[in-house]
Image (tube, coloured by chain):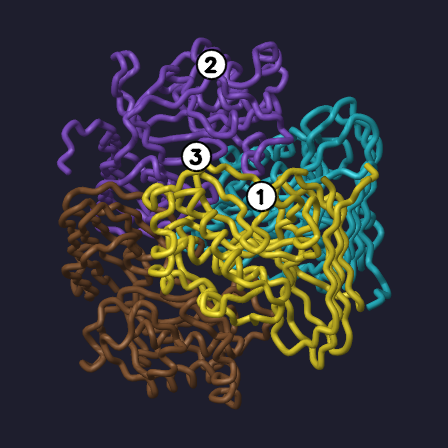
Chain colours: A yellow, B brown, C purple, D cyan
């Protein structure tokens, strides 16, 4: 399945402002680039690096004045719904692979160390493994109200627990925090999500956050915001929480004048 | 300079308990192992890995009942005080090496995103670079009271800001949080610290936390708890904050019956 | 199964000689350390690092005169024969995981680029996958004569192809070179191998080299020297060929006076 | 300084052919991308990864028939000649950083283990450090004749030693082999090289291989083919030798019909 993804940001900055961008699809076999373009006005040099999670980061310094940054790509992804296996068992902590251990720890926005009691009270009697993560997602989906503007860049999952409101970032944070508190490795994921094969109420999101849980020997996608299987996700980044995967991190006070993001199926790819 | 370091933990656990240990010196040229022993009673198999910061982690599962874990090593370290260079300049964000960028971000115990105003109000008029970090350390040293028991495993630097009390972990957290808020990369460091060449009031610490700040092209040791140059540090780990460098992380409810840590100069090493 | 492994080297060197050691078991879940000791006479400081393959390397400088280096460990490994799955299919090159690609390339001792014709002539009609690798191992086992002293540190698999003689290192090199020439990722492995459950002719090896081939989604052990399933392997290192996994690499002209290696089952481990 | 670099390959293949490409500039601060485009006809999906040296590798499968692959980029690089410091000392093996050690080992095309005697005879009396590497480069430049077609993809530096003929790849291989034999870490480098500020005889190269030697705490560029300081290098990759940095590695028998490479200064960049 071919998906066209991208974004365009218009900035006005009073002084030169260093920025780090995470808008490019992660390099992985399941999402192959067909074309890609990166454009800035004025033309700006950028340097790239991979962070410790393997996410692609682009650094560029916005000059004083107006800047447009535009990224556009066509990506080939499997034309199937999110994988699922209701028999996937929970792995005992002592048997978890070494590189999943970090995803049991609390993090800035996911203080699982402060939510153990909540988690065990709500989900301690559910069946460990797949069913338990589904129970977490269902609970978050039903108990948190989606509302633009209800959270801010400092909102943690504990705040969401209290307010019961948030956006997709917050749904993910709360879901993954509860999983960690239940000793299930869980990590934040972020990317483009076209609205393919879903009824209107769920549609019209282009950037989206979800989370991944480690069960039965691999990572699985869980999306408590939508809570229905989706197709066409293009992963930009993964990390402990939203801090590790910010579209733009800026050091200064840039004024974002407008921002547009797209993620659409390409129906008849020439190839 | 030869230092003998180690620790001994006595546990009693009701059920098999997975644990992760960080007690071994990091593998780096400045601290060379002369001898090393790791002993458990009963004899337990352990597997090792390096986390994403390069710290050595040992995994072992405590069986039900009593367990003793003992680590002991002799390490050769430079016989000099902590490096210092009062001319080390602050590096502009756009010129920082890629791998330092993560240490500008907030973390679980160091919410620098919530302390920007405090940081700039207190230190915004100090000279950027070495002097600014020293100002941070002096302020923390003078304004936070060292008091065993004043903090717990959930205490963040914001809590310390409010309470003005803590242990070396908290001094470090607050110092590095303020640095990050001032756009100076700063990371948590943890290890053994013998009391060599210091007057009594500062002595008698064996495990210790400090922090490192990136100035003038390298990382430097800053220790707001002691706030005097020290000798003989043996680094166990580095990370975003104390979460990444816990002596023991356990999954269950082990009862720690006793714990003993040592760090002493070896006066006449046979060699 | 508990295995005791280790080695002792006696050196006499005319001048200080830098050395790099690979004698410690790789840190991986399937081989867990129960105890470990490292001793030198005189006592020497050593620093450690992980090479790009994840092997543990220890650096130490032998002083002028006599030095003894001794490593000893008890390791818990699964008490089963080498895994096998005769249905494991060959993976098409375009579907191989990224991190296996390097093991399709030639290397210093395994010039697969010079042996394509040989490989395809001999094995081009065998069934791809498990059967093809077995055919390679059988052929190497039957056509190369094991003879101590028949090869030296410069011997490549092409030399072995010509001479039809070698030691376990050479058997492995030839086997893995043929696999690479057949587009099957193959890497060199090296470690301790006790003689458990094998009849006398195969016994009495303590250090041993074998190779691993990538089939059906994972790496499998193949050992053309022994060519029978074995038990109790303790992997020290893996790499492109023997260059990446040398017990000792020295920079100078040390005289090795004696060397002793052990790998034995521990029948009644106290624990 | 702005440089425009890129390449265009025309292939005709009888059957689908997996390929790995290394044509994109390495992600590093000294070479910043201003724009970049990657185009294939027909449009082909590609996946990317970083190899263990940090080089960018793009995988794509050429379909049966004709394919055009075109890469084009504008890159900002420092407008200065290759760095040099004639006082840079040789670092004793025991003091070399861990990650340089692999570049002392022989490799497929650089069998330094077979050239120790040659190296020490020729250069053993030169002054260690910068002067010794310059002596190596001068010797290679003067004693090897540049001749297109004199070597092939299997040619090692030992072959070049014998034939005294080669292309830039071979000059680099021989130079770096001699350095390794002299205990100086040396690695292969490959990239785009515009002919800026050089007299005609040296001009008109667009892809070029050189090598880097580790002296006085950092890596330095040495180019025994040109043997004069150059400007505007855009590094694609680094590795042990040319094997690790091949523009195209293909698994099958593709017919390359034409190939064009460019590397030119952009005189008046709009920005």
Tell me the element at label 1.
Answer: loop
Q: CA distance from mark 1 to mark 3?
A: 17 Å
Please state the horizontal and vertical placement of residue A116, each as a whole percent of the image: 35, 59
Tell me the element at label 3.
Answer: strand
Q: Which residue was labeled with disc 2?
A: C140
Q: Residue at x 35, y 39 (%)?
A: C29
Q: Residue at x 40, y 66 (%)?
A: B241
Tell me the element at label 2.
Answer: helix
Q: Chain of mark 1?
A: D
Please state the horizontal and vertical placement of residue A223, each as a whole percent of the image: 55, 51
Q: Residue at x 18, y 29 (%)?
A: C266
Left or right: A215 as drawn, with respect to D38: left
Q: Are marks 2 and 1 on the same chain?
A: no
Q: Chain of mark 2?
A: C
Image quadrant where residue D232 sits: bottom right
Q: Nearer the viewer, residue B223 or A177?
A: A177
Q: Nearer the viewer, residue C146 or B69?
A: B69
Q: Are marks 2 and 3 on the same chain?
A: yes
A57 to C252, vertically: above or below? below
C41 to A164, vertically: above or below? above
Q: Which residue was labeled with disc 3?
A: C238
A199 to A269, vertically: above or below? below
Q: Which residue was labeled with disc 1?
A: D51
């Amino acid at each position: 399945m071919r998906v066209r993804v991208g974004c365009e940001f218009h900035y006005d900055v009073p002084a030169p402002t260093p920025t780090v961008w995470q808008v490019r699809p992660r390099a992985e076999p399941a999402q192959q680039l067909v074309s890609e373009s990166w454009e800035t006005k004025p033309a700006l040099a950028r340097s790239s690096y991979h962070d410790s999670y393997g996410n692609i980061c682009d650094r560029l310094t916005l000059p004083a004045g107006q800047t447009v940054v535009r990224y556009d790509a066509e990506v080939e992804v499997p034309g199937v719904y999110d994988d699922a296996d209701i028999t996937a068992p929970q792995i005992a902590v002592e048997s978890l692979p070494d590189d999943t251990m970090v995803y049991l720890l609390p993090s800035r926005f996911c203080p699982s160390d402060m939510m153990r009691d909540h988690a065990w009270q709500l989900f301690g009697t559910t069946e460990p493994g797949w069913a338990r993560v589904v129970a977490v997602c269902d609970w978050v989906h039903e108990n948190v109200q989606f509302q633009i503007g209800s959270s801010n860049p400092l909102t943690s999952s504990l705040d969401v627990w209290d307010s019961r409101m948030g956006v997709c970032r917050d749904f993910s944070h709360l879901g993954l925090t509860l999983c960690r508190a239940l000793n299930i490795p869980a990590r934040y994921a972020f990317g483009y999500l076209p609205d393919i094969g879903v009824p209107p109420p769920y549609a019209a999101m282009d950037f989206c956050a979800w989370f991944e849980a480690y069960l039965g020997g691999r990572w699985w996608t869980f999306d408590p915001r939508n809570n229905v299987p989706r197709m066409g996700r293009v992963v930009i980044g993964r990390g402990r929480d939203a801090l590790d995967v910010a579209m733009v991190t800026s050091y200064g006070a840039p004024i974002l004048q407008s921002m547009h993001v797209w993620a659409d199926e390409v129906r008849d790819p020439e190839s």
